[in-house]
Amino acid sequence: MTEAEKELLSKHLPEASTEMVATLLEDFKIMLKIVPPRKSKTGDFHLHPQYGYPIITINADLNPYAFLIVLLHEMAHYKTWRRYQSKSGIRPHGPEWSCIFRNYLICSCHIKCFPTNCNRLSKDIFAKVMPPRLLINN
């Protein structure tokens, strides 16, 4: 990712999260598109119809914290698809996705991407989403 791309990304994210997000996008080779606001959704993950590479779109009008949460939400969809694409019965917001999304949120709390009061709240909420035994190797 170029410095110009990181700078553009940093305008939409909480400052502490830019390096983490840039690394994830590079590691997974995900194309991120920041798009005009849509009424039906704030973000989505899909594969390029012709070439099959992953694309995540995020609405440009989100505040930095919402942008980060939506981006992590969509990255969890990608990672779930990548890991379980050959298995049937994997639901879009099923336990596999929930576990991956929860791990992304916990990582973002550890590097202090959210205000302190949100970090405590996020950890409490997401501790209830998935039992810790499902966090192994995610």
Image (spheres, grey):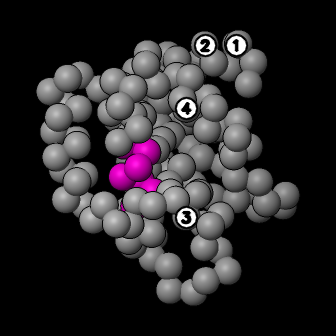
Find residue 21 and name its label.
Answer: 4
- Decide whether residue 12 is among the magenta residues: no
Q: Are marks 3 and 1 in contact (CB under 8 Å)?
A: no
Give the main secondary structure, helix, strand or loop, of the magenta stretch: helix
Q: Residue furthest right?
A: 51
Q: Which residue is mark 2?
A: 7
- Frontmost residue, 17 versus 13: 17
| Amino acid on which disc 4 is placed | Val
Disc 4 secondary structure class: helix
Which class describes the residues within 10 Å of circle 4: few (<14), some (14-19), or many (20+)?
Answer: many
Q: Are marks 1 and 4 in contact (CB under 8 Å)?
A: no
- Decide whether residue 104 is among the magenta residues: yes
Query: Looking at the figure, which quarter contains the N terminus?
Result: top right
Q: Which residues are magenta?
A: 99-105
Q: Are marks 2 and 1 in contact (CB under 8 Å)?
A: yes
Q: Which residue is mark 3?
A: 80
Cα–Cα gap, marks 2 and 3: 28 Å
N-terminal-most mark, 3 or 1: 1
Q: Which residue is mark 1?
A: 4
N-terminal-most mark, 3 or 4: 4
| Amino acid on which disc 1 is placed | Ala
Q: Position of residue 118 (x, y in %)?
A: 19, 31
Which class describes the residues within 10 Å of circle 2: few (<14), some (14-19), or many (20+)?
Answer: few
In this rendering, the answer to whether 38 lies above or below 2 is: below
